[in-house]
Amino acid sequence: MENIFKELCTGLFAELKNDELLTLSFCGENSQFIRLNNASIRQTGLVDDAMLGLKFIANDRTCVSSITVSSNYDVDMARGAAEIKRMRSETQEILEDPFLVLPTNAGSSREVKKAAGLGFDDAVDALLPAMQGVDLVGIFANGRMYRGNANSLGQYHWFETESHCLDYSLVTPEHQMVKGTYAGTDWNQDAYESYVDRSIKKLALMDRKPVRVDPGMYRTWFDAAAVADFVDMFSWNGISEASLQQGCSGFGKMRHNDQRLSPIFTITEDFSSGLVPKFNSNGEIAPESLPLISNGELTNTLVSSRTAAEYGASTNYAEDGEEMRSPTMNPGDLAHDDVLKELKTGLYLSNIHYLNWSDNPGGRITGLTRYACFWVEKGEIVAPIETMRFDDTFYRFFGTELESVGSTAEIIPDVLTYGQRNLGAITCPGILTSEFQLTL
Amino acid sequence: MIYKDLNQYSGHFSEYTELRLQENRNNRISMVNGDVMGNSVSSSSGVSSRVYKEGNWGFSSSPDLSDSAVEYVVRSASDNVRFMNDRNKMECGFILPDTCGHYEMDLTTQISRNSQKQWIDFLKDIDDYIQKKYPNLTSRTIVLAGLDMEKSLLTSSGSTSYSMTPRGIMYVSLSMENNGELVELMDVFGGLGQLEDHFLDPTQFYANIDSLADHLSRKADGVYTDAGMKDVILDADLAGILAHEAIGHTTEADLVLGGSVAREYMGRQVASELVTLIDYANSVEGKTCPVPVYIDDEGTPSEDTVIIKDGELKSFMHNKDSARHFETTPTGNARAYAFSDEPLIRMRNTAIKPGTNTLEEMIAAIDDGYYLMKSSNGQADSTSEFMFGVPLGYEIRGGKLGNAIKDTTISGVAFDVLKTIDMISSDMTWSAGGMCGKKQWIPVGMGGPAIKCQVNIGGR
């Protein structure tokens, strides 16, 4: 893939005329998808896919385009050159871009992650034995992913990684479910089997008759997967500087009212794990580590160069949408083995589901308890709970009501496949809150 | 433009095979407070093949549309299924329902195509109108978005299909401040057709914008809703999202197999007898739906799926595989968004069938309740529990409309809400820009009549 990208860079940059600037961004994958139903494989598929984004700047105007990369150089060059020609013409007609961000050459990078992954031909035999005897439904994605960025001033970045991800649910005959996501780079058969085995043991608890919990406030433990869902909401009308400037961010209270979260809550945009490239679609390199909320205090927002130009802020080279790309929440001191003992009586939520802002300025989030969620009494799991709706604000569960943070941060991968397999993950521990509000 | 006739490739087929060539083309321009903030054009094209044998599926795709690439993906998908057949013989002997149909639909506009400059001029005209007439607004966002989905399909059963299904929409979002609080409202215009089919004359939208600005102004002075179970009228936008998100998804046969609550409800009374809920394939009473599907992406001729008839749950939506499992016939609901996506069971145009009441009669029938007009973020679960944001609505007091309300939410269990429906309006309105996510995007039609029912509404 890298050679394809390089050849297109050379060819398409040569199409430019004086004073024209072009940034190319490449996004590709060579993936195997295996669909599982009732612990049997129903479909295997191979997807080779790549897209090339073109950002053309001339006459203080910007045009953006993207084309499919067929890997046939002549076809792709013809497509790319046609787009340049179209955009060249457009830039003579359209309105000037008032917040133009010009590309620069701030250096180049190349990061190729080699992994001892699972071979496509070996995947079926590796996956199936661990799941026999249970009803498992899920999808396994496996293979290499590629990201590239280059501009006509000579800047060049390449990122290549390999990963696998089994996203699954185990289902009881009564349709109770346990969700699991086994992901990584190197394939470790023992670790995989052990992970699935833990899910199967959790499923056994789901056989107990579910209890209905009344609406109200409950002492609650959230597993890391549930915390990741909350953290993910920060990328939507949250940590974005543009959202704050436009008055549609849940972080407004922290920015304008000097409100803080708990002193034991710290989250950082941290690229040191190498799960995602540090360069964005403009080819700008983000800092290796950017504190966002430190000991409860908002220290940085995500600022793209465009937002910086528009609002007079300093960019920290966030992506244009100013969403978090590699958020990492600091672990605390609550060992996982002590969670039930510390929880005493309350809710143990493994997963939450379908989150939505119910009051964005107030930081209030609603959603459903889902999958393996339990009622706990005197430090012992009693039974799964019936699905409940919650509605509470992160100013409480990451703030005033945050009692402890788990001692181990887990990597919760992004499993979405809209368009292409997503890169990235949220790294976070579980949390214990003294109160959490169930509503329906 | 992709090939319309794929018959030249049928010699590569050895088992049950679907071959699809597809190109999606997007055009999006956004303007914020008069500045062009986004101007992008994209296209994505390629070929995919899916092969079925003995209960297993093989899939392959390539972004290359050459003859050799087509041959490669068919061979690769066939190899994948043979690989599976060697390992999984549990469903040996299962065969898919056989369907065959032929259809060609090209909805490319007959109007000469606009340049990006002409679209930007169009947006600028609308923005200028808003700025001059409503100078107190905090921000104005206008977005034009076009999507052309062009597909050719050939199956080993002999089905052939070519479709060019376009969608052109415009979002207008206005906001203002009132006592330090940001108040926003958005509306969407357009629908089936390319941008030129909807947006040639900006003056046609001035009245819509006046209406939006008027609602926004009223909302800024609006009141908080009283929390609790209330009599409400859900206008077409909300009735449509309820039908799609909270009922439709629970009756997609793959989600039924995954444990949706509808599995237990088949043949039972799940709604008021006034309710007939249909996933329309392509037209309603002679009028083309927002997302017309005549042949689905498995080559099955599409037909309306009557999900609920007179309150009784009658049918799920099926692809060939689920129809085989449930021993019924496929309904033509298998749809894929991109060339590299496999077809999944997806809705097309889902709505409650219109009734006999007028909106005025429905408002007059409520002593203390709300008329809820627009939906924002919506979500639902396979239990049919839902929560939708409501950015626009009015009080109803003594059978008359009262104050506008501030942003609120409604929630409940959709199958319970359907049982409370006691009036349905006689008109039918489709929302312009429905897009559904299920690991893939897909354009859908959502809408319907207004319904009078009871829901739980959020308060301050």
Image (spheres, coloured by chain):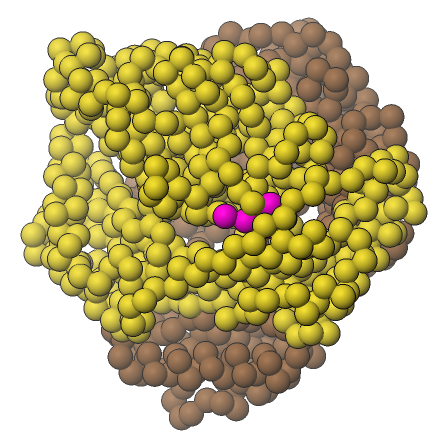
Chain colours: A brown, B yellow
Residue, far left: B133
- Camera sees residue A417: no
Residue visible at 39% across and 80% down?
A86
Would residue B157 be visible to someone looking at this image? yes
Picture coordinates of residue A222, whole percent (x, y): 61, 26
Residue at x 52% of width, y 19% of height: B313
- Give above or below for A233 relative to B1: above
Left/right of residue A409 with respect to residue B296 in the rendered view: right
**Residue numbers of the magenta segment:** B294-300
Which residue occupies the foreground of this view, A312 or B241? Answer: B241
Closer to us: A36 or B287 = B287
Residue displayed at 70% across by 58% down: B49
Residue at the spot 50% in from the left edge and 61% down from the top edge? B150
Does the segment drawn in magenta span residue B299? yes
Work out whether A139 lies above or below A389: below
| Residue B148, horizontal then vertical, whole percent | 44, 60
Residue B38 left/right relative to A220: left
Magenta stretch prevailing secondary structure: loop
Tell me, yes or no, whether the highlighted magenta stretch contains residue B13: no
Q: Is residue A263 above or below residue A163?
A: above
Q: Splitting the image into 4 quarters, where does residue B168 fall? A: bottom left
- Name the residue nearer the viewer: A36 or A294: A36
Image quadrant occupied by the C terminus of chain B: top left
Query: How far across and down, in percent of the image, does residue A234 sit?
Result: 47, 42
Residue A189 position in % (x across, y down)? 89, 43
Q: Nearer the viewer, residue B284 or A175?
A: B284
Quarter of the image for residue B30 reads: bottom left
